[in-house]
Image: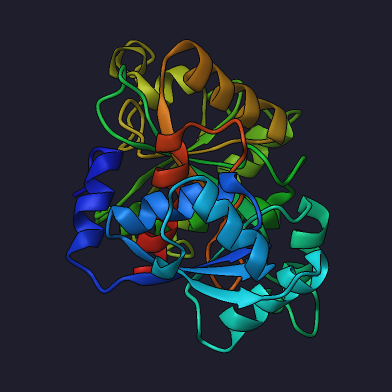
Amino acid sequence: MITRLEQIIDVLKSNDKKRLVAAYANDAHTIEAVNNAVEAGIVAGVLVGDKDTIEKTCADHNIDANKFTIVHEPNELKAAQKAVELINNGEGDMIMKGLVSTDKYMKAILNKEKGLMPPKAVLSHVTVMENPNYHKLLVCSDVAVIPQPDLNQKIALTNYVVNVAKSLGIETPKVALVAASEQVLPKMDACVDAAIISKMADRGQIKSAYVDGPLALDVAIDKESAEIKKLDSKVAGDADCLVFPNIESGNVFYKCNTKLANAELGAMVVGAKCPAILSSRGDSVKTKLYSIALAALVASK
């Protein structure tokens, strides 16, 4: 079982390399991130964009352009579409946003005819977080994509975090459906939805996972709090996964962990035919590398 993010890299080194396709990789930010992953021995890099610009950027940053496959497409939107086409043609295993704007990147992925979305799929964001104050990795969703998930979307989020946790080697992940209280309060949608999803898991509609909720955050991740409140739960105090009721709660948790607790993380968008990486210029070198590694790990399963 993987208990630290750096262990993902060690696991990947013994696997066949997955092909990372970077959409409109004309910038140093993207090229350096892909180069670090190639240097770490965890992926093969495919850069889609303007060939001359890519080669010049590589030269300016002392990176050997020959270590990448470069696909020439100088137009921003067409480069994103080309990256998606490569995935659909089986020439790539995961996709990464380059200099292309987020709306054009997502437009290419979401295109109904030529995109990467299976019918009725839910696109969501999954973060794997390593907090120095918690005894194992935490798989969290959704902190960045779905503002107010409805019941069906929460079911999808639950299945996504379970699948990612299984990729980390957790045989039966423990999923906490987070709310403001561990009581089932009929006037709080988060509590009602969590109770429904928990019962679905009890009846086998969510496979191979322990799912409990509603759980307040303290009882989800702190054994002492769970014992004080006398909760009889396989999840309480030892959660592997957290599913948040809305983007505000998830995003605040994410930023509190990274800014106040020095947590490190890897993150990706899931729900498409392959993992999608949305790294930011503000991400640390480690975050970029861990995000690529996480996507490669999930793509291997």
Answer whether residue 86 is visible to the viewer in this image.
yes
Q: Position of residue 175 (x, y in %)?
A: 42, 43
**Residue 102 vs residue 178, the one in the foreground:** 102
Answer whether residue 197 is visible to the viewer in this image.
no
Farthest-out residue, bottom: 89
Q: Position of residue 222 (x, y in %)?
A: 34, 18
In this image, 14 relative to 23: left or right?
A: left
**Count of marks, rendered view:** 0
Above or below residue 50? Residue 213 is above
In this image, 137 relative to 164: left or right?
A: left
**Residue 245 vs residue 71, the one in the foreground:** 71
Above or below residue 78? Residue 153 is above
Residue at point 37% right, 24% down? 221
Q: Quadrant of the C terminus?
A: bottom left
Q: Quadrant of residue 117?
A: bottom right
Residue at point 27% right, 50% down? 8
In this image, 31 relative to 134: left or right?
A: right
Residue at point 48% right, 48% down? 33
**Residue 206 vs residue 53, the one in the foreground:** 53
Above or below residue 220? Residue 156 is below
Look at the image and name its color scheme: rainbow
Q: Quadrant of residue 23?
A: bottom right
Q: Position of residue 89 (x, y in %)?
A: 57, 89
Q: Position of residue 265 (x, y in %)?
A: 43, 35
Residue at point 80% right, 75% down? 111
